[in-house]
Amino acid sequence: MPMYTKETAMTKPSLLLLAALATLTVGTAQAAPSDDACAALMEARGHLVTMIGSSDKSAYDGLKAKIHGASAKLDATLAAMAKSYNAGDEAKAAAFKPTWEDFKKTRETEIIPFVYAGKQADAKALAGGIQAERMGKMKAAMGCK
């Protein structure tokens, strides 16, 4: 039978309290990587939609920078998910990434150049066509709400 001393009796409740606090803190402080990916995806999309709908050419560079910033966040999240020990995260990243790469290529080589050239109708056609299909696939793959 273990012997309890004065120090042991005081330490045990303190450790239990610390363990309980740590559990509560960790449980509430961390968002799921897929939620972060969805948020970054929607942020990039929002800036692109704003860019396509804008006739203010002086705003294009700033919007493009915001699109690229949100895309960089998404790329970093995908990289972390792909290296995750969570098989669900790895699978979501693997399903999402090919469509995301196609989406970015079309955005960078067609949609944004159309906007800069003043061809908003062409940009909108692509955004509402193949890009909308890709957006649906990406949201489904990641489980976006």
Image (tube, rainbow, N blue to C red):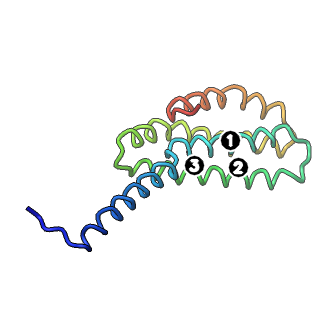
- Three-letter amino acid code at disc 1? Arg
Mark 2 sits on what residue?
67
Q: Residue at x 62, y 49 (%)?
A: 71
Which quadrant would residue 21 be assigned to in this image? bottom left
> Disc 2 and disc 3: Cα gap in Å?
11 Å
Q: Are marks 2 and 1 in contact (CB under 8 Å)?
A: yes
Q: Residue at x 39, y 54 (%)?
A: 20
Which residue is more in the foreground, 126 or 74?
74
Mark 1 sits on what residue?
107
Q: Secondary structure at mark 1?
A: helix
Q: Position of residue 41 (x, y in %)?
A: 62, 42
Mark 3 sits on what residue?
74
- Three-letter amino acid code at disc 2? Ile
Is 38 on the left-hand or right-hand side of 84? right
In the depicted structure, whether residue 136 falls above or below residue 83? above
Q: Secondary structure at mark 3?
A: helix
